[in-house]
């Protein structure tokens, strides 16, 4: 049946430009003036546009090669800008197939929207605070995995308004496991959305939740659920955060109410949002107010919670360094439970990956290092409990360890750039040979790196730079060169330059530009 419902794009009837212009495939096109005389005879604007498009495609030899090989769809594919003038028709077809697969993969991911989360809790308190037992002689301190949890979900769009989500979760804490599988149907409404959940795990459960916009600047979340267990009926009302519960017992029938807070949000200004959350329950009743300001370079959040059994005030500040793709965060929380301080950083290491490291120091929680690795929509979290008390050694190692990890992962972009350069070898040899025959632009040596460093300390970009040469011309825009294919950022946060030694018309030249300066070769030398 799959063949009956194939890709609609495969059934599209494409226009034949040669037939429309009434010219054979191996002939030269008439001049622009001749086409202009032909268009004077066409009264319909649609026919004129068709004629103009056909002439523009067939008059360009590179677009014509793509059209002859792939048809109209090949002209609409993204990604030809960098490779169009360097490829033969056979290579164009291979490149088209690769780009088509990437487009299909992106479309599939956007439709399914897979999300995953893996958390591995590690107890390493015995390393810095060993427990001495005269009856147990340990040479190596033990590091224990105290808990593991995993969640995974995918979306299955049915219509523009309806989406089905399949999600599952597994967890193990101190040898006790738990799991659940949920099917959720969500429908978009004019001013919000509503969803129905069916869950199987710790007893079947049915839930309803939703969100509604009350005004231009105010919205609210709400929800409820009913959980059926052995001799247990569990109704609940919920919203978004801080769940609580209490129990009632009637002649062997246990009714457990789980109350979730009702949340209201209000847009206070262009960059500021306020949240008001009210939570009622037997053992955890509270009201909290959150004010969050989020701008391009800063993010600040202030929280005040009053409730039973705890009250606290917390503040968090994040500084966004956009050019370095780095975020620095500090936070503190003071309340009846104790005091907690956090500091950390988030660094983007590639296009789809980033690493987050956070150190938590508090009383009575001790010192904890949390490392998070984010790859696209998948998240891996490793909370490492280093000590139950505030020990200087624990704070030191918690701070130094992420820095060491950063220097390790810093090598990943370099390896990715080197892999891209290996794939450019054939293209580099062909362009180099063509430029040598015409005595055109030949890149002898090109390095990219720190401004005041020697060539030995810089990254060699001769091959990727030569691959960007088109018809003895090299044009680089005023953007960071680390974004170019085969490049990477060898010194994050520092001034970088691009040094080029090249030959043009059998004469040697050299120049050096800053990272964000444009470059045009041969420039004035070609005049």
Image (cartoon, rainbow, N blue to C red):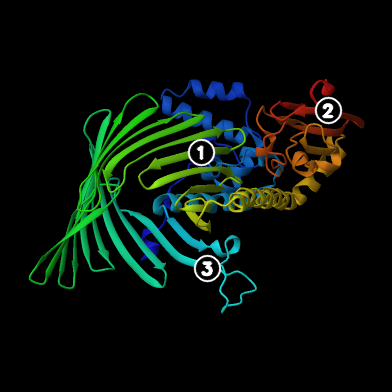
- Across and down, in percent, residue 172 comes to 41, 68
Reading the image, the residue beneath label 1 is 330
Mark 3 or 2, nearer chain start = 3
Residue shown at 57%/31% (left/top)? 55
Q: Position of residue 137 (x, y in %)?
A: 61, 77
Give the secondary structure at mark 1. strand
Of tags 2 and 1, which is closer to the observer? 1
Name the residue at 60% across, 35% down: 58
Q: Earlier in the sequence, mark 2 or mark 1?
A: 1
Residue 417 is left or right of residue 183, and the answer is: right
Left or right: 233 in relation to 412:
left
Q: Is residue 193 visible?
A: no
Q: Earlier in the sequence, mark 3 or mark 1?
A: 3
Secondary structure category for the residue under label 3: strand
Looking at the image, residue 329 sits to the left or right of residue 501; the answer is left
How far apart are the two marked residues, 3 and 2, measured between alpha carbons?
57 Å
Q: Quadrant of the C terminus?
A: top right
Residue denoted by label 3: 144
The CA distance from mark 3 to mark 1 is 29 Å
Give x and y (percent) for residue 275.
Answer: 30, 35
Residue bearing the label numbered 2: 511
Query: Splitting the image into 4 quarters, where does residue 138 fall?
Result: bottom right
């Amino acid at each position: 049946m799959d063949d009956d419902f194939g890709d609609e794009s495969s059934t599209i009837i494409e226009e034949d430009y040669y037939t429309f212009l009434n010219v054979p495939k191996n002939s030269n096109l008439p001049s622009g003036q001749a086409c202009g005389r032909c268009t004077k005879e066409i009264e319909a604007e649609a026919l004129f546009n068709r004629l103009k498009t056909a002439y523009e495609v067939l008059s360009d030899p590179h677009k014509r090669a793509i059209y002859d090989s792939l048809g109209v769809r090949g002209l609409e594919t993204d990604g030809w800008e960098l490779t169009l003038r360097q490829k033969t028709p056979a290579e164009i077809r291979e490149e088209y197939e690769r780009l088509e697969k990437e487009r299909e993969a992106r479309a599939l991911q956007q439709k399914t929207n897979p999300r995953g989360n893996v958390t591995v809790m590690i107890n390493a308190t015995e390393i810095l605070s060993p427990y001495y037992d005269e009856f147990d002689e340990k040479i190596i301190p033990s590091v224990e995995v105290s808990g593991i949890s995993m969640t995974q979900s995918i979306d299955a769009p049915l219509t523009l308004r309806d989406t089905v989500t399949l999600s599952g979760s597994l967890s193990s804490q101190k040898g006790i496991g738990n799991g659940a599988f949920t099917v959720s149907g969500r429908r978009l409404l004019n001013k919000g959305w509503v969803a129905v959940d069916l869950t199987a795990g710790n007893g079947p459960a049915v839930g309803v939740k939703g969100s509604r916009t009350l005004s231009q600047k105010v919205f609210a979340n709400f929800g409820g659920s009913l959980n059926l267990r052995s001799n247990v009926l569990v109704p609940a009302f919920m919203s978004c955060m801080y769940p609580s519960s209490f129990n009632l017992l009637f002649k062997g029938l246990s009714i457990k109410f789980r109350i979730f807070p009702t949340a209201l949000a209000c847009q206070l200004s262009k960059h500021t949002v306020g949240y008001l959350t009210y939570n009622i329950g037997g053992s955890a009743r509270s009201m909290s107010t959150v004010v969050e300001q989020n701008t391009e370079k800063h993010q600040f959040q202030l929280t005040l919670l009053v409730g039973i059994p705890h009250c606290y005030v917390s503040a968090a500040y994040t500084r966004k360094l956009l050019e370095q793709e780095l975020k620095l965060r500090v936070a503190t929380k003071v309340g009846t439970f104790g005091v907690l301080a956090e500091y950390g950083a988030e660094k983007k290491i590639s296009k789809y990956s980033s690493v987050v490291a956070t150190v938590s120091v508090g009383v009575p929680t001790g010192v904890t290092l949390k490392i998070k690795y984010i790859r696209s929509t998948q998240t891996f979290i490793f909370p490492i409990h280093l000590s139950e008390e505030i020990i200087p050694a624990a704070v030191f190692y918690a701070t130094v360890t992420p820095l060491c990890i950063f220097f390790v992962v810093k090598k990943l972009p370099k390896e990715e750039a080197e892999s891209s350069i290996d794939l450019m070898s054939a293209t580099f040899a062909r362009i180099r040979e063509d430029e040598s025959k015409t005595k055109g632009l030949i890149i002898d040596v090109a390095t990219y790196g720190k401004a005041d460093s020697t060539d030995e300390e810089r990254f060699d970009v001769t091959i990727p730079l030569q691959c960007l040469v088109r018809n003895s011309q090299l044009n680089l825009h005023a953007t960071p060169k680390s974004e170019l294919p085969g490049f990477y950022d060898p010194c994050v946060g520092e001034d970088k330059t691009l040094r080029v030694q090249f030959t043009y018309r059998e004469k040697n030249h050299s120049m050096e530009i800053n990272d964000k300066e444009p470059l045009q070769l041969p420039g004035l030398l070609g005049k």
